[in-house]
Amino acid sequence: MFAQVIDPVALSLGPIKIHWYGIILGSAALIGLYLAVREGKRHGLDSDLFLDMVVWVIPAAILGARLYYVLFEWDYYSQNPEDIIAVWKGGLAIHGGLTGAFLAGYFFLRKRGMPFLLTADIVAPSIILGQAIGRWGNFINQEAHGGPVSLEFLKSLHLPDWIIEQMYINGVYYHPTFLYESLWNLTGFLLLLLLRRVNPKRGEILFTYLIWYSLGRFFIEGLRTDSLTFQGPEWLAGLLEALWAPMGLLFEPGALSGGNVRIAQLVSLCLALAGIFLILLRRGLGYARQSYLESEERVSG
């Protein structure tokens, strides 16, 4: 046991190496696209809209994710510029990817004269399912893990041996935080599918996605040892620590390197609060008039 880990290279064709990381991310994108196209048809949206949009959104998401990561790790990349484009080694920050994707999607839909909130509601389940799948790329690369744990702890989670083996890195077992987040996101995917049937106001599937994903990311991030950080004011670091305290009753927080504030925790907190605020504000001001299923009812009618 623990004699071999999964090779991150799935296939070598001469000098060309195809990495599992890329295969997994590509598969996540294709599955998400299929689900979005299928749901879009129920609302009378042409499948070409999503096919055209993904041509802009996917590169923007990858570029945003990489730039976000590189900027916050500039001390390393300024000394190793050749690694800036080495995305197969990992180092794609989801919050940067979301920023790039939503900006590209917004301007694409605006140019096409299509409703942004309806389209975002349609693709939100695809996004969170893609994130659930994508975390397995981190698993293959043995990254995005938490702090050290015992073998007994991993066995107590009833994990298969091949997961435990991959969490054995340089003689130490680590929290499989990739798995925690993947399962959290998968649950969120099912929640958003259920929410569709409840017929929320337009935009609220997107906002619920932001709330659900961000809450899970906030608490799971506190277990990780590779968090992007910065040196913030003590009151901010203390606030985040206090909010994470319930998780500390069960687990030790992951070690911080560099600053005292985990960037992903701060961004997640802001996104969760923004999602709640937007739902309440839009309903309170009467902006949330159209329901999610209105367009579907017109198509079927």
Image (tube, grey):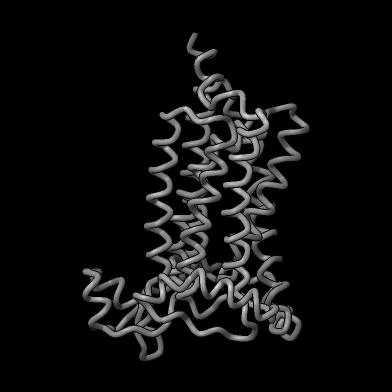
258 and 162: which is toward the camera: 258
Give the position of the N terminus as an image quadrant: bottom left
Q: Residue at x 50, y 15 (%)?
A: 297
240 and 260: which is toward the camera: 240
- Residue 205, image x, y percentages: 52, 38
Relative to residue 251, is residue 281 drawn left or right?
right
Residue 251: name its quadrant: bottom left
Q: Residue at x 50, y 85 (%)?
A: 255
Q: What is the residue that sits farthest to the right in this orientation?
A: 111
Q: Residue at x 71, y 40 (%)?
A: 106
Q: Residue at x 62, y 62 (%)?
A: 267
- Vertical relation: 16 (above or below) 131: below
- Residue 161, image x, y percentages: 24, 73
- Residue 127, image x, y percentages: 52, 47
- Vertical relation: 191 (above or below) 242: above
Report whether residue 37 is seen: yes
